[in-house]
Structures are given as C-alpha cells and as structure tokens.
Amino acid sequence: MGMIFYLSHQPGDFVKLPQLVAVDKLLHGIAYAILAGTFLYSLYPFIHDSNRAVTCIIVVVMCILFGVSDEFHQSFVPGRFVSAWDVAADGCGALLVVGLWYKLSAKKRRELILTSDKKGS
C-alpha cells in the first residue's frame, strides 16, 4: 500500500511510461494483484474452508476501496487525474489473483480429501 501511495504521489510529468496501449491499466492491474496477494497472505492464518469465499470478497472489496482512495489522493497531485478505468483495472488485478487463489486452494483441498480417503481405506 505504501508503494502504491508513493507511486501515485509522483507528479504527472515525473511518470514516464512506455508508449504502449493500456500500459497504465496493465501496471494498475499488476500492482493491485500484488496487493491482493499480500492481503491473502496476511489473512492466511484466519482462512478456513468455510470462509474462503467471504475472504475472496473482502480482499477484492478492500483492493477496490484502496483504489478509490488512491484515485482521490491523485486528484491532489499536479499532473495526475482521477480515472474510474484505473479503479476498474485495480479491481480486475485483484479479482484475477483472488480467483486464481480460490481455484488453487479448492484443488488442493480436494487432493487432501482424496489422499486422506485413500489412507483411511
């Protein structure tokens, strides 16, 4: 969160991005994918099978709320502009990581169940 805040506090003329289509949105998605992964990592001790879906929703909502606050913060930085598309890219990056984590954790849980069933027989 600190790195995102630092980067969004840089004036618009300081930020030099490659001249590629939607590179800004890609970078937003990557930054918020990392943020979502960090949230999931920090919540890992509290995640159980019964609350995985709720955890996913909470992480994505927290990333989107931070994205909104980041855009608000940028409105005070010279040369930077508020963009709902940036928030959408933030949410997409978070959703991608959370969805991948959910799918992988469900697969891992199924494998554990199958392994324990084989040992029990």
Image: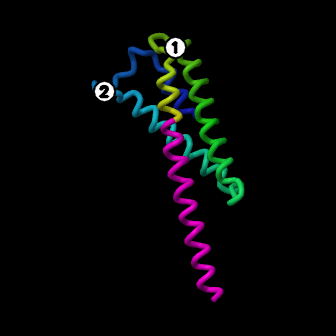
Residue at mark 2: 21
* Of residues 12 and 56, the one drawn nearer to the viewer in this rendering: 56
From what the image shows, is residue 88 above or below residue 36?
Answer: above
- Measured as percent of width and height from the top left, residue 78 is found at 48, 10
Looking at the magenta stretch, what is its main secondary structure?
A: helix
Of helix, strand and loop, which one carries label 1? Answer: loop
**Residue 35 placement (x, y as % from top left):** 55, 40
Q: Look at discs 1 and 2 and give the one toward the viewer.
A: 2
Give coordinates of residue 38: x percent, y percent: 57, 46
Image side of residue 65 versus residue 85, left or right: right
Q: Circle 2: is it few (<14), some (14-19), or many (20+) Cα within 10 Å? A: few
At a point 53% along the width and 40% down the height, the residue shown is: 94
Residue 32 place in picture, x, y as percent: 51, 37
Identified at 53% across, 18% down, the residue is 74
Q: Are marks 1 and 2 in contact (CB under 8 Å)?
A: no
Q: Which quadrant does the C terminus fall into?
A: bottom right
Residue 1's quadrant in the figure?
A: top right
Q: Is residue 120 above or below residue 57?
A: below
48 drawn magenta: no
**Badge 1 amino acid:** Val
Neighbour class for label 1 at 10 Å: few (<14), some, many (≥20)?
some
Distance of label 1 from label 2 (alpha carbons): 24 Å
Q: Earlier in the sequence, mark 1 or mark 2?
A: 2
Helix, strand or loop at label 2? It is loop
Q: Which residue is mark 1?
A: 77
For the point 40% across and 33% down, the residue is 26
In the picture, the disc for residue 98 is: none
Range of the magenta residues?
92-121
User: Of the residues shown, which amino acid type is indicated by label 2?
Assistant: Val
Is residue 105 part of the magenta span, yes or no? yes
